[in-house]
Amino acid sequence: MTTYLHYFTGNAYQGLTLLSALGVLFILSSIGGMIAGRNRTMEADVFIGWGAVTTVFTVAAVFTAGTLGMLTWALFAAGLVCAALLLRREKRLLAPGTGRVLLLLSPILLIAAAMEPSQWDEFSHWLSAPKSLFLSNDVPSADNLPQGTDMLVSYPYGWPYLTYLASRAVGVFMDGSGRIYNVVFLGLFGLIAAKVACRAAGHDRPARLTWRLAGLAALFGTVINPTFIQKIVLTAYADVSTAVVLGVAVYLLWTLLDAEAEGDRAKARQSAWQATFVMAALINIKQVNLILFLGLVISFLIAAWRAPDISLSRAVRLAVGIGILPLLVYGAWRYHVNVNIPGGGGGEATFMPFEQWNTHVIPQIMLQMLVVAGKKSAFFVVMAVTTIFAVRAFFRPSGRYGRLAILGGGTFVSYNTFLLFTYVASFGEKVALTAVSYWRYNTHLGMIAVLMIAVGAGWAWKRWDLENHLPKPITWLPVVLVVAAPFIFAHKLRFDLEPNKPHYFTVARGIISSVPKDMPLVIIDPLGSGESAIITRYITNRKGILFLSAFQGPTLPFILKTMADSKGKSWVLIHSVTPEMTRHFNGRFTNDSSYLLNWNEDHWRLVKEWPYPAVSGSSALIKAE
């Protein structure tokens, strides 16, 4: 029982993680609500506020030095003022149903707040970047080298800004805030999806959401979401934020098109105004989001062109207006990368010379993309159907839902065309033939799929008159599923407890007090993947930890040479040993413990030993595959 409860508790900063992240989202929502005005899409307030903040922070960081700290406190103050004004003007601060959705998601929020970071990319960038911001109050540049561990300095900082804000609010680096943001974002988008489902069913969503509708909203964001992958959602990765912000942008542009078709220009202008800030947030999360931005804008123009009751020239003007702010943010950051970062473009993918492109294996790459799609059919079938409806709507305009299909299907096709192009023009042949990360990239389109699922659910509800045919208890099923799922699958959601991750954290924290900061450290882990090293780098805040893993051909001579080169100059941390090592050291080191060694004149002195936690009576050591 104690072990089970540990899935939901255990992190000393659990409460602070929740409060800091929710506090930042409240500030962003209040600012977004004031910017958007009355009669807006309230579920988009957070993302509008984020777009405004990422614009101000990016421009300030590029053209001034060290101003983020001052701007942060000004932002918090402005958020509180906006909250007071909103409350006075509208008598509410949040979109209807937000509180109930968050209560239903509280079990998974507790899990998210209790977790430790555990994924490779978190340590190599998505936590390193906000930590650098936190330590320096500025983005990296020639005058402000990255603080902490290695990171991809040229990546945009729209997403790291949020973790930075949560950390600055409490004065402690909050590496779990990103997980909270991801879950709340999915819940907020679920509210939009529930609204879409009600509309497709022929009903207006009530002003005050019932518990059953709140359960449906939470269900759309989690259980029904075909791209809900725990090792993406419950991390600091930027994939979920990209997907949700893109989904909100699609919804706003769809609303804009509907308003244009109905001749409601005031509503169209307001939707465009909201969309420009949401798109500013989107374009500053990841470099590739420029493609999502362009694909969506082009799809918007196609939808307007094919709609007989929408003026294409006016749609073009609206699209230009929407694009100014996002492109300003994008241009400011690209200027910074090219002018202020030494070497410019560090860590970014580049295109190979044309003669090196993988044009000769395009059929094989496409086949592998189809193989991956076949394994993730829940998502790709939805998007394939969406694309079919989009083609049909292109040739036979079919009103509101045809326009949504063009927005969703057009973005899907354009993005996947770009992915194919990158496999041909950017990746080496061997990597390209595996269609590396193809599924993960497509999760960026996940909320488009959720919108289409919501439409289908609404149609089914209306077509079969389910309101009058379903027993009342069945309508509570979304609430039951959303609340029960985290308790049933807690062991799967707490992937940070997989061996040997907690052990590596324990050892890394012990290193801080055992190894002088100015002394080099070498990690010997010949059966490991190198994960132990990146965790140690992150926890100890050391960039230069050398390591030897299973992927480096760790023969005994190589291992001994690596250790010999360290004599008198550095400390050695052994996380695993080969049989040859065991024999060479006469059984002194085994795979039951990690060992910290220091050279003492003519022998390796054992400084500290950390036993691996027992699993089924044996070492928890997991060999690299």
Image (cartoon, helix red, strand yellow):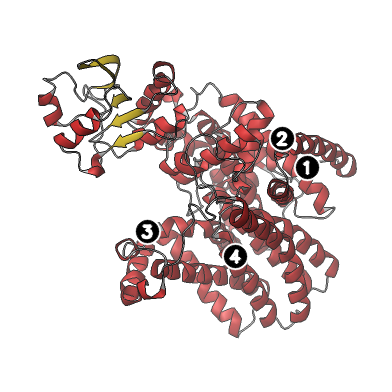
For mark 4, what is the residue? 459
Position in image of residue 126 (x %, y %) = 51, 43
For mark 1, what is the residue? 30
The image shows residue 611, relative to residue 55, as above or below, that is above
Give the number of the mark in front: 1 or 2. 2
Is 518 left, or right, of 454 in this rendering?
left
Give the number of the mark in front: 4 or 3. 3
The image shows residue 197, relative to residue 140, as above or below, that is below
Quadrant of the rendering where the C terminus is positioned: top left
Is 226 left, or right, of 410 in this rendering?
left
User: Which amino acid type corresponds to the residue marked 1 in the rendered image?
Assistant: Ser
Give the number of the mark in front: 3 or 1. 3
Residue at image position (49%, 27%) is 8
For mark 2, what is the residue? 69
Q: Callout 3: helix, strand or loop?
A: loop
Position in image of residue 50 (x %, y %) = 70, 48
Residue at image position (48%, 36%) is 149
User: In this rendering, does residue 201 appear at all?
Assistant: no
Q: What is the CA distance from the residue labelled 3 to the residue labelled 2?
A: 39 Å
For mark 3, what is the residue? 436
Q: What is the CA distance from the residue labelled 3 to the residue labelled 1?
A: 40 Å
Q: Are marks 4 and 3 in contact (CB under 8 Å)?
A: no
Give the number of the mark in front: 3 or 2. 2
Position in image of residue 140 (x %, y %) = 59, 43
User: Which amino acid type corresponds to the residue marked 4 in the rendered image?
Assistant: Trp
User: Which amino acid type corresponds to the residue marked 3 in the rendered image?
Assistant: Val
